[in-house]
Image (spheres, rainbow, N blue to C red):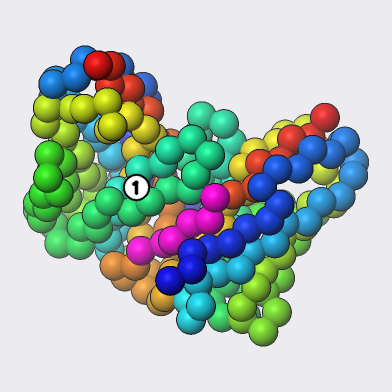
Amino acid sequence: TQLLEQSPQFLSIQEGENLTVYCNSSSVFSSLQWYRQEPGEGPVLLVTVVTGGEVKKLKRLTFQFGDARKDSSLHITAAQPGDTGLYLCAGEGMAGNMLTFGGGTRLMVKP
Amino acid sequence: EAGVAQSPRYKIIEKRQSVAFWCNPISGHATLYWYQQILGQGPKLLIQFQNNGVVDDSQLPKDRFSAERLKGVDSTLKIQPAKLEDSAVYLCASSPRGRFDTEAFFGQGTRLTVV
């Protein structure tokens, strides 16, 4: 079983602050996805990174895939209360037949 | 485009009872996943179907859990008998293909409480 560890598990910050969430594994993934989940809803895809070293930006969110395709980070600039939620990373195995999720980072942005 | 539909949204049962969840994936999606999400944790894959065949069920507790996807469309997940530790949200997801760079579309989930 491929394991993904996310850190931190919980993060409470003030509006306007920056933050970084990490997703680490000892396994190599063919692709890595970041999802955001709100209470009572299923996760919703934010981005997929495929190439080692790849960086993708989505407005104030910056996603990076590690060179060795074992880790990833999510950086949020000038966080807003609307960013509050559970952020999940998910790795797709090299065989392409399993999507494994990390434990999640619960973010709260206070106004 | 209609999303992934799941029912029921909520279910409360006593331990040792049985329960079934239903999922209707997005039309045309070949891959269907069932995940278990315990409060405060990330989703854990229970079983993955490609059309009507099982791709992976290594983490499905087969002594009490079963799942089927007849005709490669709808799917049901059953628990019999339920235990207290089965209390969780059961998420169904589908994706158009099963290999590489694939987005999983999730339903709202079924929240199961076993008392």
Question: In terms of secondary structure, where does tag 1 sit?
Answer: strand
Toward which corner of the image does residue B12 lie, by quadrant?
top right
Residue A27 is at least partly visible in this image: no
Main secondary structure found in the magenta portion? loop
Q: In which quarter of the image is the C terminus of chain A?
A: top left
On the image, the x and y values in percent for residue A85 come to 37, 33
On the image, the x and y values in percent for residue B115 come to 82, 30
Residue B107 forms part of the magenta stretch: yes
Which residue is nearer to you in this view: A7 or A82? A82
Identify which amino acid the numbered label 1 is placed on: Tyr
**Is residue B37 shown above or below B45?**
above
Q: In this view, does B58 lie to the left or right of A8?
A: right
> Mark 1 falls within which chain?
A
Magenta segment, which residues? B103-108
Toward which corner of the image does residue B6 lie, by quadrant?
bottom right
On the image, the x and y values in percent for residue B110 come to 65, 47
